[in-house]
Image: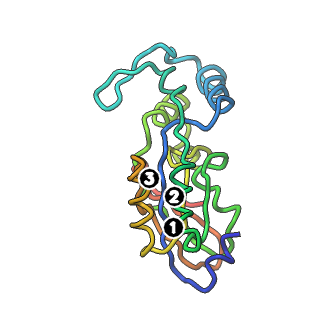
Amino acid sequence: AIVGAFGSVLSCFLILVSMSPGFQDLTAILLLVILFFAILRPIQKKLTEKIEIDGKKIDIGKLILSPTRTYAPVMKKIFEIHKKNIHGLIHCSGGGQTKVLNFIDNLHIIKDNLFSAPPLFRLIQAESGTDWKEMYKVFNMGHRMEIYTSEQNANEIISISKSFNVDAKIIGRVESSDQKKITIKSEFGEFYF
């Protein structure tokens, strides 16, 4: 558990390695297509319909099926240099941005510098009408991997990630608390879990 790894440290920093705006496997993709485009609402968009992303038009189906880059080479390099400096790792798929709650006690995770939500998740929200708080609870929102480390190690870890053309940045911090909780400050509001 992350709790033991933090020991008596009252504040540490959190960095996020953002690997891809896509989903992790075909099962999740199929679930997305079935749930959001067929069951919950009448079909509003066709998978062949084009939407604009970064000035380019792309089929919705291609967006959903875009491959996810593996972050194994990035993590291998990070472990080679910083294994002893990592206090915790969270793979945010299968629990979204609140997954860390399963692994902490008496800590407050504050995520207040997140990356912008990728177009795929904006599309899911718009088509499903799902509340943004629920989106952060269920989906990774484009943030797949969190590395819990000190601020002094964060910049070197970020540099390693960027050397693989994978964007990364400090997205928040961890503070001691009398209970486990998460605060997410995003472009869509502030959410408490």
Q: Secondary structure at mark 1?
A: helix
The residue at 56%/56% (across/down) is 76
Q: Amino acid at mark 1?
A: Ile
Q: Quadrant of the C terminus?
A: bottom right
Q: Which residue is mark 1?
A: 81
Picture disc at residue 77 = 2
Separation (CA) of disc 2 from disc 1: 7 Å
Q: Which residue is mark 3?
A: 189
Instruction: Classify 10 Å Cα crowding around label 3: few (below 14), some (14-19), many (20 and above).
Output: few
Vertical comparison of 67 with 184: above or below: above
Vertical comparison of 15 with 124: above or below: below
Q: Nearer the viewer, mark 3 or mark 2?
A: 2
Mark 2 and 1 residues: CB-CB less than 8 Å, in contact?
yes
Separation (CA) of disc 3 from disc 1: 36 Å
Q: How is the image coloured?
A: rainbow
Instruction: Classify 10 Å Cα crowding around label 2: few (below 14), some (14-19), many (20 and above).
Output: some
Mark 3 and 1 residues: CB-CB less than 8 Å, in contact?
no
The residue at 64%/34% (across/down) is 25
Vertical comparison of 148 with 141: above or below: below
Position in image of residue 13 (x %, y %): 48, 71
User: Which of 188/158 is in front?
Assistant: 158
Separation (CA) of disc 3 from disc 2: 35 Å
Q: Amino acid at mark 2?
A: Lys
